[in-house]
Amino acid sequence: MSSYSKPDMTSRVQNILPKIVLSPSLFLILIFVYGFILFSAALSFTDSRILPSYDFVGFSNYIKLFGLRHWSIALTNLFIFGALYIVICTCIGLSLAIFLDQKIRGEGFLRPIYLYPMALSFIVTGTAWKWFLDPGIGLEHTMHQLGWESFEFNWIKDRNMAIYTVVIAAVWQTSGFVMSMFLAGLRGIDNQLLKAAQIDGASNFNLYRRIIIPQLRPAFLSAFVILSHLAIKSYDLIVALTNGGPGRATEVPSTFMYSYTFARNQMGIGASSAVIMLLTIASVIVPYLYAELKENKNG
Amino acid sequence: MLKRLMLGTVFTTLLSFQTHADQSVEVLHWWTSGGEAGALNVLKDDLSSKGVSWNDMPVAGGSGTAAMTVLRARVAAGNPPTAVQMLGFDILDWAQQGALTDLNAVAKEGNWDAVIPTALQKFSKHEGKWIAAPVNVHSTNWIWSNKAILDELNISEPNSWDDLVSAMDKVKASGKVALAHGGQPWQDATVFESIALLTGGGDFYKKAFIDLDEETLGSDTMKTVFERMEVLRGYVDDNFSGRDWNLASAMVINGEAAFQIMGDWAKGEFLRANKKPGADFLCLRVPGTQGYVTFNSDQFAMFNVDGNQTESQAQLAKSILAPEFQSAFNVVKGSVPARTDVSDAAFDECGKKGMKDLVEANDNGKLYGSMAHGHSAPAAIKNAFYDVITAHFNGEFDSETAVAELVDAIAIAK
Amino acid sequence: MASITQDTAINTGRITRALIYLFLFLFALYYLLPFGIMVLNSVKPLDEILSGNMVAFPDRWTIEPWLKAWSTAQVGIEPTGLAPYFWNSIKVVIPAVIISTLLGAFNGYILTKWRFKGDTILFGLMLFSCFIPFQIVLIPMARILGITGLAGSTSGLIFVHIVYGIGFTTLYFRNYYKAIPNELIMAAQIDGAGFFRIFYRIMLPVSGPIIVVCVIWQFTNIWNDFLFGASFTDFDSQPMTVALNNLVSSSTGVKEYNVHFAGAIIAALPTLLVYVLAGRYFVRGLMAGSVKG
């Protein structure tokens, strides 16, 4: 290519080429993500029911939305579920990674076991969990048969506790994935530093607290982004496990949105809940992105 | 020579495409379990014998919710299926969007106005035009019972609320579960509508669930209905919540529980377990609702499609209402035919009873759309009912609060 | 690279090690449990399941549910089993994974090695696109596919999966390529290598691990997608998940749980296989890439 054009022409082509190659992706994202978000935002101000309509009704969908009892339940559940899910997944993921990193025999065997739940769709796995958690046929029943009569585990039937069973199943699905992110981070740490610290007589606990875990910061951040994205989008899991029950006790914004948009034919309210959901995501993710990208400029 | 050959190929391709388009229907539905889909095959065979091929587009899930979601995408894309399985008010909603076609010619030819119950016609007609072909009539006010348990405890057929309560007391005292129930909103609502019907009668049912009359919704009778739901809650086992309806049926089949209040599709579970109606299990109307039928009806709504498909669409509509198909399909499905002039010869005891009840209820004006199954009010209202009923049944409200919440919820959803 | 593969193992006593093994073993049980329930129930006659025997070993073992789920179960009007839908899914997954990975690779390459003003903002925009709830795109996307004539076709579905895969693939490749020294690129430029040649000669050869990560991620997501698969296909192009859903979610029909579980495992086999086979590269790819921001 360079032999056919003058040097300055070449560099100009070379300068513009990356932008040309990048532009289709950018175009697709602008239209199909940001365009559609704007479209949803517009719908949230209309009286759309079964299909989009363009009769604007101002903020009335938002007023209705926040007047609905189970929207506030859904929001509360998202905070409970999201916080527990992210914290527990991170703790389990980190512990497993640290332990698996101790020259464990059979690591190659254990790792896929920890990781495989990500591969399963919840359409059916939910049923298996539902049965296991059901006191009449699952764990509690089995314990009773084994002779432990006083054993009690009926969270899934208890409207105050059911959201925690959703956490158990969700942690099951993704903590292995988080484990592999931390494991990758651990394996990237320079061993010289550790050896030096060990020679200095640091205890194992301090070694991890002071030296290793701080170095895993990028892994923590990646895990946080992926987990918060999964927490907010969780849908199949809840539908399969409790379908929002008992009563409406485990409704979350994503099930709420689907139900209003597609089952209740109140697309306007559905769209307004989607907007609130997106704002929530943005309030969590944008600060992270900002920090990440700022750091990027220095590096 | 080559040119002619090419032209010829193009022409024949075009031609075959044309004939193909002429003679096919694409059908979106959620009947995917063995019995239902097998029954639908009868329809497919009938159509193919008339030269119309069937392109199957099944999408199950959420009692049709998934299929309705897909339908919206298809309509938005300008590519609707020829015919879509639909329930109650959804049909009218789509008709209002102007998406459905006019079937009056077929309807006139088949005399649909005379043979299809009037309460059903409300959902198959829009502004005087037939827009959908009903396949079946399910009725929801059935109570299924294990005959062995009733015999053993000397319980006779309950005929009133008090009978039912004393029967359930006996069962409970014997250590068995009196009422098998699955705690999912639609199941709670299915029980609720029967209790409302037996408590307040037909007028109450109509005013509350169909007219959505505020005074009736907030009445003392409604409070009684909620109180009776609390009573029933006492007869349900602790593990009810989230249970699938068919696992509740299995409890009656296995003799763990005596009763289940559920629509007539439950019969399929009993038959699959080789139980005989009358001998092993009883199909009774919910006590106090004898003479009434609360129904829901699966229909195929016909969408506006290209001119060359309308003929096959009309043929599909015609075949759906053919008495042979209506009989064959409903024998398998557990429901009864959507036309009242079909022979009951092929049906079992419960089916015969269901057909007789339907005709009588229709004649006496005691045939009402089911609230729990979207035949008394649109989806938004139906779900507002679900919200309150299920919250109350799970103990979040007492009966008095529930009545107040119900009035509010319906007002918001309107 | 050698130091990377070393463990950060610490010196521990025998008891501690035993405890660690116990911990790891208990978690392995936790992860295997639901799958175990699925497998057990998929080889059990339906009567045993319905009589309340759900979390126990079968009295009578049977392979029938598996055969039924694969070839004779009713998923629509014809008793075809899941078999025909397998192929439909493959036809979507393979091109969608290849194209979205390729796009991600180029984007990551440009965003790290051909930087220009405003590139970080563009990257931020792409990253945020990962978080869009799919339910809100359904109807506008359907309209656009309808206008472009892609509605109800395999190519339409592939297109949709590519669009919503770009965010993640770009994220993975960008973080991975960031670790590759810029000096290498500059040297190549001085030698006269252009945009594409640098990509083929320098970037691609070292991209193995991150390609594995991308492929696993995209394969899993696309293979398990239900909403798009159901909405943007026709009667003759429905993917596996739609068939699986039809098998398990019938509302008023008899539910054959054993067949459902067998079907679910069959439907998950390709992804399971990918995870087990590529699992070790997965960690290695993550290690070299995405977590080192």
Image (cartoon, rainbow, N blue to C red):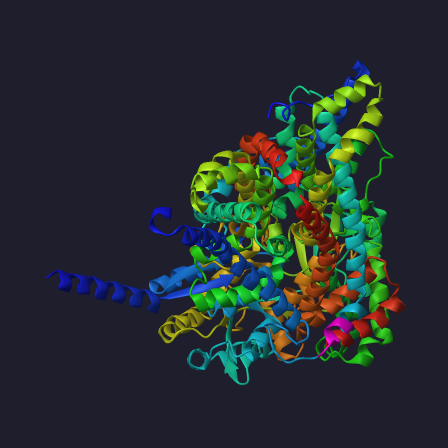
Q: Is residue A111 visible?
A: yes
Residue C220, image x, y percentages: 56, 43
Magenta stretch: dominant SS? helix
Q: In the image, is residue A232 part of the stretch drawn in magenta?
A: no
Residue A91, image x, y percentages: 78, 37
Quarter of the image where the C terminus of chain A is located:
top right
Q: Is residue B114 above or below residue A13?
A: below
Number of residue marks: 0
Residue A193 as seen in the image, left or right of residue B51? right
Q: Residue at x 82, y 54 (%)?
A: B235
Q: Residue at x 75, y 24 (%)?
A: A193
Tell me where residue B392 sits by quadrant.
bottom right
Residue B138 as seen in the image, left or right of residue B135? right
Query: Which residues lie in the magenta part?
Result: A58-63
Q: Residue at x 51, y 40 (%)?
A: C186
Q: Is residue C220 above or below residue B126?
A: above
Tell me where residue B412 sits by quadrant.
bottom right
Residue B306, image x, y percentages: 39, 74
User: In this orientation, which residue lies closer to the viewer: B326 or C72?
Assistant: C72
Q: In the image, is residue A59 part of the stretch drawn in magenta?
A: yes
